[in-house]
Image: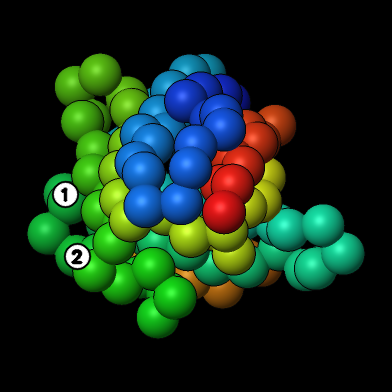
Amino acid sequence: QVQLAESGGGLVQAGGSLRLSCAASGRTWSGYVMGWFRQAPGKEREFVAVISWGGATTNYADAVKGRFTISRDNAKSTVTLQMNSLKPEDTAVYYCAAASIPRALVGRIEDFGSWGQGTQVTVSS
């Protein structure tokens, strides 16, 4: 298992930006697909973005396309989610996740075996 720790959440006004980071540790994460998911109060956890090991392939939920960007630095074992033009509906706990199987690029929650504790993002109107 890979251990994951998110940081960078906080309170921001609508239209603002936040940058979330996820640090991986533990067993090697070579080849792992990395993803971001979020869960708003009273709602199920949902897919946000995913990136392949080499970074060449990314996939985004329709709700965040054009506003969010996922990237990774394998040398530093980190994954970043840059969030721009934030909306109140982006308010949620954001989770970093790791998957050892390539099909995880589709963004299915059940394909991800390692999860961070989450970081709160609150967007005020």
Marks 1 and 2 close (CB-CB < 8 Å): yes
> Residue at point 12% right, 59% down?
56
Is 123 located above or below residue 105 in the figure?
above
Residue at the right extreme, as displayed: 42
Label number found at residue 10? none
> Residue at point 34% right, 41% down?
17
Q: Position of residue 68 (x, y in %)?
A: 31, 57
Q: Amino acid at mark 1?
A: Gly
Q: Residues within 10 Å of mark 1 (few under 14, many from 20)?
A: some
Q: Position of residue 85 (x, y in %)?
A: 33, 56
Task: Tell me if I can see residue 1 in this picture.
Answer: no
Question: Image check: 89 left or right of 72?
Answer: right
Question: Image check: 99 left or right of 83?
Answer: right
Query: Where does label 2 land, which residue?
Result: 57
Q: Amino acid at mark 2?
A: Thr
Label number found at residue 54? 1
Query: Quick one: SS at disc 1?
Result: loop
Question: Image check: 23 left or right of 117?
Answer: left
> Residue at point 37% right, 52% down?
15
Residue at the left extreme, as displayed: 56
The one of 20 and 72 positioned closer to us in this rendering: 20
The one of 90 and 118 positioned closer to us in this rendering: 90
Is 18 located above or below residue 23 in the figure?
below
Quarter placement of the N terminus: top right
Query: Quick one: SS at disc 2?
Result: loop
> Residue at point 66% right, 51% down?
92
Alpha-carbon distance for marks 1 and 2? 8 Å
Q: Position of residue 10 (x, y in %)?
A: 56, 29
Q: Quadrant of residue 3?
A: top right
The one of 66 and 85 positioned closer to us in this rendering: 85
Q: Quadrant of residue 76?
A: top left
Number of labels in the image equals 2
